Amino acid sequence: MKNFTAIIALVFASGCSSTQYLYKGQHEGVDISYRWNHPKGKPSELLLKLTNTAAEDKQVDLSIDLYIQGRTVETLQADTCIRAGQTMNGKINGIYFVPERLTTAHIKEGGTQVEMTNTGVTSAICQ
C-alpha cells in the first residue's frame, strides 16, 4: 500500500510541476530556452536557460525583442561567457529580465511573443 501511495504522489507532483522552458534553438553549440515567471505581487520575469553543449567555452551575446500584436514593445540585451558543458538557468545561476513596458496582464493574455533577434556565439575562454 505504501508503494501505491508513493506512486500516486509522484504522478500528482509531476502534473503540478512548474512551467517548462520553451526551446528557441541552438546557436554554435549553445541551446537557448526561456520561460515566464509570475511571482505574486511582483512584476513578471523572463528567465533564460542557456546550455553549452560544445566542448569549448562560448561567449554569448543576445538581443531579445518582446512583441505584442507584431509590434516591438521592448528590447532586452545580455552577454555572458558560458563554460563547456555548463547550464545557466534563470534566477538560479543564469540570466533573467524584468520588462519595464510589458505588464503581467499582457503576458498572461498570451499575445506576447519572445524572439531572439540577434544572437552571437563565439569561442572564448571564460575567466
Image: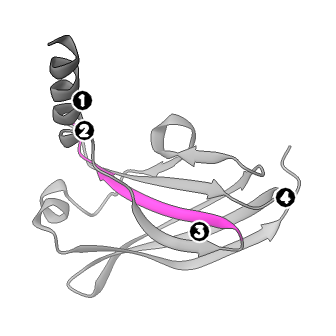
SS under mark 2: helix
Q: Position of residue 93 (x, y in %)?
A: 57, 38
User: Does residue 51 appear to the left or right of 95 in the view shown?
Assistant: right
> Which residue does the image show at 69% across and 59% down from the upper left?
53
Examine the image and state in which quarter residue 30 appears: bottom right
Residue beneath label 1, please?
A: 10
> Which residue does the image show at 54% across and 64% down from the upper left?
32
Q: Are marks 2 and 4 in contact (CB under 8 Å)?
A: no
SS under mark 4: loop
Judge by depth and name the residue closer to the eye, 46 or 83: 83
Q: Position of residue 65 (x, y in %)?
A: 42, 75
Q: Position of residue 60 (x, y in %)?
A: 69, 64
Badge 3 density bin: few <14, some 14–19, many ≥20, Cα 10 Å: some
User: Does residue 82 appear to the left or right of 105 in the view shown?
Assistant: right
Badge 2 density bin: few <14, some 14–19, many ≥20, Cα 10 Å: few
Q: Position of residue 66 (x, y in %)?
A: 35, 72
Sequence-wise, the earlier of marks 2 and 3 is 2
Residue beneath label 2, please?
A: 14
Up/down of 2 relative to 27, above or below: above
Residues at marks 2 and 3, CA–CA distance in whole angstroms = 32 Å
Q: Quadrant of the C terminus?
A: top right
Which region is colored magenta? 29-41
